[in-house]
Structure formats: C-alpha cells, structure tokens
Amino acid sequence: MSDNSLKQAPDDPQHYCARTPEYYLQTLDPVLRASFTEPQIAAVKQLLGASIPRPAAKLVDLRFWVDLLAYRFYVVLFVGKDRRGGDRTEFADPMARKGNAITALLLLIGLNFLISLFVLLIALSIKLAVGYSLLPHPH
C-alpha cells in the first residue's frame, strides 16, 4: 500500500468520538476504496465500529492547564464507574504503587488545604463586612 492510500483527515470540527466508520472509509483513496468487495467493506466497518471509543458519563470531569515558567501542563481528572471489561493482566510494580499512593495522598491534602483556605477567606470577608472583631480591643 502506498503512502498516498490514506488521505489526511480534514480538520473538521466533528469530535473524533462522534465519527462513524463511514467517515474513516471516506478518508481512503477513492481508487483503493473502490477495490474493496462488499464483505471486505463490511468487515472494515465492523472493525472500525468496535475500535471507536464510546465516552461514558463521569462523576468528575476536570480538565485545566497549568502554566509553570516556560512550560504548560495539561491536567485531567476523571472519576466514574469502571466499565472496562475483565481484570487487568498487568499490575504496576510495588514502587509505582507506592508512588501513586503518595501522589494521591498529596493531591488530597492539597485539595483539603485549598478548600479550607477558601472557607477561611469567605469567613474573614463576612467578618469584615459585618464589622465584627474577634479581639476585645481592636488596634
């Protein structure tokens, strides 16, 4: 098969999860596409249909960028029901598991700190707006 047998997919606004097997078949070179028989096209459509991801609803779908000096990092956090089939055949080594546990713990502590700080700032703003003083003799 030549390098020109597959055309570049056009830069269209259609999200890749919404694309159908027919969309991908249309990206093939018309001469190559015409050489397929009906059973071959049906088999390719079935294969493409099974390989196209189907997004599932998430409880938490958090995506944001973090700019640090000269680099931009993309952070994604998904929380949802595990719909993957079967058990995992590969398990992370013990050191990676410990690293993941420490990272998760640090993220939870950081999130707890940010929420506490936010609540404290809201309480301080309310206190200042009302004019209440915590000390008996304000300075």
Image (tube, rainbow, N blue to C red):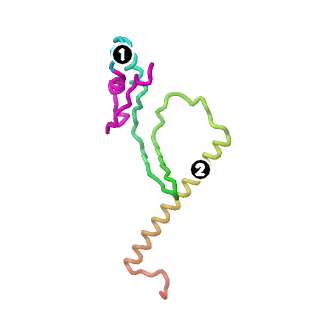
Disc 1, SS? helix
How many other residues sit within 10 Å of disc 2, few (<14), some (14-19) or many (≥20)?
A: few
* Residue at 61 percent of width and 47 percent of height: 101
* Residue at 34 percent of width and 34 percent of height: 10
- Against 55, is 5 above or below? above
**What mark, if any, has residue 42 been given in the picture?**
1
Q: Residue 104, image x and y in percent?
A: 57, 49
Q: Residue 73, image x and y in percent?
A: 50, 51
The residue carrying mark 2 is 103
How many other residues sit within 10 Å of disc 1, few (<14), some (14-19) or many (≥20)?
A: few
In which quadrant will I find the N terminus?
Answer: top left
**C-alpha gap between disc 2 and disc 1:** 46 Å
Mark 2 or mark 1: name the one nearer the start of the chain. Answer: 1
Nearest to the observer: residue 37 or residue 116: 37
Write the start and end of the magenta stretch as one range: 1-29
**Which is in the foreground here, disc 2 or disc 1?**
1
Residue type at mark 2 is: Thr
Disc 2, SS? helix
Marks 2/1 in contact by CB < 8 Å: the verdict is: no
* Residue at 51 percent of width and 53 percent of height: 71
Residue 63 within the segment the image draws in magenta: no
Q: Residue 85, image x and y in percent?
A: 49, 28
* Residue at 41 percent of width and 24 percent of height: 4
